[in-house]
Amino acid sequence: MLAADGPGWRIHPAAVLVMAMSVVYPSYLAVAGAAAGGSAARTVAALRTVFVLGYLAGLGLFSLAAQGEASVGPAVGPIRVAVGVAVVAALVAHLPRPAPAGEPGPPPGTDPAAAARPAVLAAAAAVLLMRAADSLRLVYLPLYALGAGTPRPMISALFAVTVAVEVAVLAPVSAVGDRIGSRWTLLGVCGIGVLSFLTLIAGGGYPGLVLSQALYAVFAAGFPSIGMVLLGETLRAGLGGGAGAYTALVQVGATAGVLTPLVVPGYTVAVFWIAVLFCLGAAVLLVARPRRAGRGTPVVAGR
């Protein structure tokens, strides 16, 4: 739609279709989880690393395509290059590959649908609050830094720091998740998130911003990957189910993270106290979350 000539309004349905691609993310997790055969945390971390590297590759490809459009013409512009990449991706997706082994089913005599509602609600609310803190920072940090007089190129460099640190810590975070469990790993991630926002609130000029962003990268790497694992474990739905629940929750959390700071006038550092409360609230929910007993709820005839 964007590559073809047409009325200006076509950008809106095209944008909706692009955003709809996020709906298939749970399918990626389900396929990866069935094919990998390793721990859920490591599988999610590996897939997220691929996504981050793909994001960086996309930025580089956009830059090259923009230069090509300026020197050659629109035939090699970013939109048409993106169409070519999408076609190649679709063809690669249909290459022959070994049939997935599938995730193990529930033990005999158990009902996987009988989820402990308090545990599920606590896990879902914790992930939602962490996403709200993440969304708040993504939206309001550039505005705050710009209002504080930080040059635009230096603001962009902050996000480069985040991506570099995030790629570096994804594997260690997943290893910690395997060792101590998703619940306690997420609790530590919440603590690092609080420390990141407090570092930002404390000031310290541009070095303080860089340090805060480096700490935040650990939070940004940990809560999506380990959060999906926690949701999958709590729902007893595997990686695909955890990713599906996460995809729904992040939409609500992102909206809360963007709208809640509107109660604070201006783009001041006070906005980030809200993010601190989000992280603390998530930590409280993780600590208070009841443990789910056993591998399932016995199925009783006639009930």
Image (cartoon, helix red, strand yellow):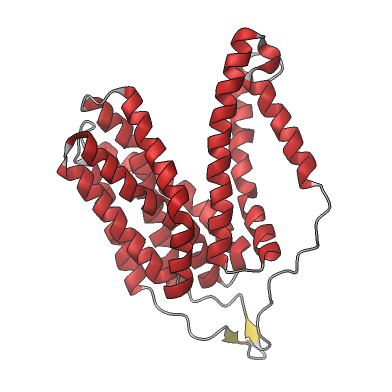
Q: Which residue extends farthest bottom?
A: 301
Residue 208 in picture, x, y percent from top left: 22, 41
Residue 66 in picture, x, y percent from top left: 58, 17
Q: Is residue 4 left or right of residue 241?
A: right
Residue 292 in picture, x, y percent from top left: 47, 80
Residue 30 in picture, x, y percent from top left: 66, 60
**Closest to the observer, 70 or 246:** 70
Q: Is residue 110 left or right of residue 160?
A: right
**Closest to the observer, 207 or 243:** 207
Q: Give the residue at x 54% y 51%.
A: 48
Quarter of the image with the C terminus in it: bottom right
- 210 versus 283 height, above or below: above
Q: Give the residue at x 61% y 75%.
A: 113
Q: Does residue 121 show up?
A: no
**Closest to the observer, 268 or 168:** 168
Q: Quadrant of residue 191?
A: bottom left
Q: Give the residue at x 36% y 32%.
A: 157
Quarter of the image with the N terminus in it: top right
Q: Quadrant of residue 121?
A: bottom left
Q: Does residue 114 show up?
A: yes
Q: Which residue extends farthest right?
A: 96
Q: Is residue 213 left or right of residue 246?
A: left
